[in-house]
Image (cartoon, rainbow, N blue to C red):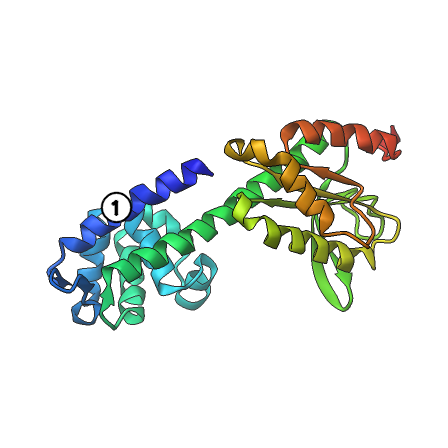
Amino acid sequence: MPELYRRLDDMARRIGRVLAELAIFDKVRCVVEFDKADAEAIRELIERDPEVMVPFFVMLCGLSDREFERLHGIRKVYELGRRPEPERLGAFANVVNACLRRPLYLETVLFKFYKNWEEHQKRHVRRRVKDVVISLLRERGYDAGKIWVRCGGKLREVDCAVPPNPDNVRVAILVRTGVFKDLVKRSKEFSSEFDELSKCLAGARFVAVYLVPAHERHRLDKIREVIVKERMGKKPYDFVALTEEDLETLLKKLAEWGIPRRGGS
């Protein structure tokens, strides 16, 4: 996570420098006059530093990569930041120009980019953590994977299930990551998912995985306390993992609980 914020700071500085060089940038008011730009001006702006300007405009427009594809036929929009293609870049610039038709303060656009890209990257980190958990279990011989179960009339995601069979889940593993300021929110998410899924996964063990970044390891006891306390008066988690070492302990717990490996061993 510290690397994420160093990267964010660098990207914001580069974006600010590019915007400040524009003819449509009002240096007195620190306003980017997007209302005076056309698609060609947007395209030239992106080409100055596509690695950061493509994510910047994606975040500023408020469209996801899937929406760029579904609504505008632009597949894998983030690839334009690494491998600009004239035709697709032109299509992207047209969408950006259509979305941004009002002048905006430089501080406003940088703040929006920073916060939206922060959340976007955190989701990527969470997916990576899920992959780590699933890969570790598979390497140790367990059948594991993400699944969806129909519960309470809705499809609900289980980050990692052992086995990944909606009709026979023995262990449901809920995965999150984040910094200390996110902890209360994440703890409530864990508890809410536990309550919802436990109605439909009778007999399953529930594990919470909240991998703590290295710079916050000194808070492990407090973090565990907050997560566990959220279940006060309710059925507790069968196990809470906060570190990679805890994941090794989880493997021992699976053996204690009699969870079979692939092949029934």
Quarter of the figure with residue 249: top right
Q: Secondary structure at mark 1?
A: helix
Q: Position of residue 164 (x, y in %)?
A: 76, 45
Q: Quadrant location of the C terminus?
A: top right
Q: Position of residue 226 (x, y in %)?
A: 67, 46
What's under tag 1, amino acid-wise? Arg
The residue located at (20%, 72%) in the rendering is 35
Q: Vertical placement of 101 versus 199: above or below?
A: below
Whether residue 244 appears in this view of the structure is yes
Identify which residue, 136 or 10, lies in the foreground.
10
- Which residue sits at x=29%, y=71%? 98
Relative vertical location of residue 182 with respect to residue 196 in this rendering, above or below = above
Q: Position of residue 78 (x, y in %)?
A: 38, 50
Crowd class of label 1 (few under 14; some 14 to 19; many from 20; radius 10 Å): few
Q: Looking at the rendering, which quadrant does residue 129 occupy?
A: top right
Task: From the top left corner, tell me how far across and down residue 179 is, in percent.
Answer: 53, 43
